[in-house]
Amino acid sequence: MSYENFPNDRLQPEPDLKEQSGKWRNYLTAGLIIALLGTWAYIIWDKSKAREIIQKKDVVINTTSTQRDQLQKELEDATMRYDMIKTSNANMLHSKDSTITRRDREIADKKNRIQQLLSKVDATQEELAEAKGLIASLNTDIVGYKARVEKLEAEKVALTNEKNTVIMERNKVLKDFDSVTNVVAQKENIIDVASTLSASNFSIQGINERSNGKEKETTVAKRVDKLRISFDLDENRVAQSGLKNIYVCITAPDGKELTEEKMGSGKFSTRDGELKSYTQKLDVNYTQGKRQTLSIDWKQNTDFTTGEYKIEVYNNGFKIGEGICSLKKGGLFS
């Protein structure tokens, strides 16, 4: 009897195995679901993280672009101020001093470096910071440049005013000098005119030279061999003692000036600027304030003619006296 129930006792655990297999299936399914959910959660987190990184990059890019644009505007503003200073003072800056030349070069170098930094599409924050610092330094340079230009302009104005003052003073001195010179010239001219000698007491004689060497005065033209002319130089207390030039001019009855180069004739200038011929020139050693008598003989290669011979005496360009000698036609026995 006992052997008949034993096989039934060995088949009783089978329901537990099925139950355990179902539980493991459930566990596996739950694990897969959890893994799937974790995967999706990771994927969602990763996308969110990537989006956040992209957003941060976009913020950085936008911030960098904004900074670059702002720095570019500051550079353009600084360049405009610098160009305005140079344009408004173009005339003065043609003659630059060493300070202006050096600052021009420094400003140009900084502008080039700043533009290089701002031209980079992928400029870093360090490079933008360098550009910002250079722009601040550039603005400081431009302020100093403007101050130097204003100082030079003020010095130029001061020098111009000083030059104008000197020119005015020079012109005044020249004007005063000219006035003094004119006064002196006028006085010298007055003295010069006053020192001109005067001639008086004219005596003009026709002289006939005889074979025995004796001379006889005559008024008959055909017998006159020479004219003897004498006159006095009057006292003059202005004229200085010394050599004086006296010009004697003889005009024939026909109006012709009598000259003979071999006998010392020539030309002189009158005070009116006229060039006049003289018959003879006398170099007189004049004594101040003394009367002196002069005498000359005029002989010519041609015969004397009837009529009036006019004798004029000049000194210092002025005519100082004149006399007349009349020669007549002789009679049958003259």
Image (cartoon, rainbow, N blue to C red):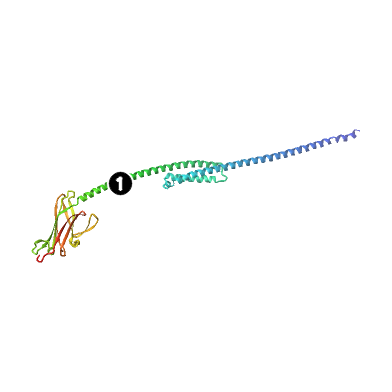
| Residue sitting at x 76%, y 38% | 29
In the shown orientation, is residue 20 left or right of residue 254? right
In the shown orientation, is residue 131 left or right of residue 190? right
Q: Is residue 237 above or below residue 16?
A: below
Q: Residue furthest bottom?
A: 332
Residue tagged 1 = 175
Q: Nearer the viewer, residue 123 or 138?
A: 138
Quadrant that contains the N terminus: top right
Q: Position of residue 84 (x, y in %)?
A: 47, 45
Quadrant that contains the C terminus: bottom left
Q: Position of residue 245 (x, y in %)?
A: 19, 55
Q: Position of residue 298 (x, y in %)?
A: 15, 60
Q: Quadrant of residue 39?
A: top right
Can see residue 164? yes
Q: Position of residue 268 (x, y in %)?
A: 22, 57
Q: Residue furthest right?
A: 1
Q: What is the total number of numbered labels drawn onto the structure image? A: 1
Q: Is residue 289 above or below residue 302?
A: above
Q: Nearer the viewer, residue 196 or 81?
A: 196
**Considering the numbered disc 1 on the image, is that residue within a helix, a strand or a loop?**
helix
Disc 1 marks a residue whose amino acid type is Lys
Q: Residue furthest front?
A: 331
